[in-house]
Image (spheres, rainbow, N blue to C red):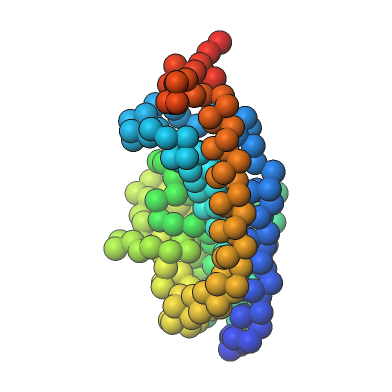
């Protein structure tokens, strides 16, 4: 086990997490058009929220579009951060996706092999998706034992970037190879780094770099809201009011 190089860590967070995250957000704001996203959003939801002005509708549509993108984008970037941290400390490797489905990271620690499927938060999937992950854990264990020996101790982990789970060890009564740990937040980051405080440490460079880029994002965001507000008025206004018949027809008429 090596000590984590925090200078390298901070550099990686800036160059491989925050910068690409904002670049993707900037690009999304530049190219998004009302006609491209309005048909993919639920007009009944906006009406249920009592949206009455073009500006409010533009904001609701744009925010829904951005939030649906951001969780996935940022989750992927934070997954890469976790793999990079584990590579520094435990020589962890990104798993071959064609060979190990549901698994993102493989590493050795304390004489054990860890296979880790990384998710953004603890509430990431339904029962079918969780069962698929468990089956893939069992398959991966067989592959590794075939190469390393039957007595190889392999620990399967569903690692979550944030959150918590009060019952970490998940037991499958029918197949012990489908047993796994669900480690979230502090427990996950400590597993891949050996540092119990890393989950808080990584906030600092995220905060510093985000502040540098946030104003540019806010300026682009305001421009896009104004542009989409104008388009909504042209498309969906009747007698200076939102015409919900037009909006529903635009989204759903056959």
Residue 155: percent from left, percent from top? 49, 65
Quarter containing the N terminus = bottom right
Whether residue 194 can be seen here? yes
Q: Is residue 151 above or below residue 126?
A: below
Q: Is residue 106 above or below residue 7?
A: above
Q: So how many labels did they put on this image?
A: 0
Q: Relative to the observer, which residue lies in front, 37 or 20?
A: 37
Q: Identify the residue at image location x=58%, y=65%.
A: 215
Quarter containing the C terminus = top right
Q: Quadrant of residue 31?
A: top right
Q: Identify the residue at image location x=44%, y=49%.
A: 124
Q: Relative to the observer, which residue lies in front, 154 or 181?
A: 181
Residue 116: percent from left, percent from top? 54, 62
Q: Quadrant of residue 83?
A: bottom right
Q: Residue furthest front?
A: 239
Residue 115: percent from left, percent from top? 55, 62
Horizontal side of residue 83 vs 49, given as left or right: right
Whether residue 106 can be seen here? no
Q: Identify the residue at image location x=62%, y=30%.
A: 35
């Amino acid at each position: 086990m090596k000590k984590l190089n925090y200078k390298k860590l901070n550099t990686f967070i800036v160059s491989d997490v925050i910068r690409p995250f904002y670049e993707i957000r900037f690009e999304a704001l530049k190219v998004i058009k009302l006609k491209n996203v309005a048909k993919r959003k639920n007009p009944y939801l906006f009406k249920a929220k009592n949206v009455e002005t073009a500006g409010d509708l533009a904001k609701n549509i744009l925010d829904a579009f951005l939030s649906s993108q951001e969780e996935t984008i940022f989750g992927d970037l934070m997954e890469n951060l976790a793999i990079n941290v584990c590579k520094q400390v435990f020589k962890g490797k990104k798993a071959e996706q064609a060979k190990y489905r549901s698994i993102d990271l493989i590493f050795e620690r304390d004489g054990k092999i860890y296979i880790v499927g990384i998710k953004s938060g603890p509430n990431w999937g339904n029962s079918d998706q969780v069962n698929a992950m468990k089956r893939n854990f069992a398959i991966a264990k067989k592959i590794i034992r075939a190469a390393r020996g039957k007595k190889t101790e392999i620990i399967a982990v569903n690692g979550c970037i944030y959150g918590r789970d009060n019952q970490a060890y998940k037991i499958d009564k029918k197949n012990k190879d489908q047993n796994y740990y669900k480690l979230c937040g502090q427990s996950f980051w400590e597993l891949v780094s050996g540092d119990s405080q890393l989950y808080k440490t990584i906030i600092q460079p995220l905060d510093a770099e985000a502040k540098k880029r946030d104003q540019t994002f806010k300026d682009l965001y305001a421009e896009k809201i104004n542009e989409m507000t104008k388009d909504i008025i042209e498309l969906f206004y009747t007698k200076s009011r939102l015409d919900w018949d037009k909006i529903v027809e635009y989204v759903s008429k056959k």
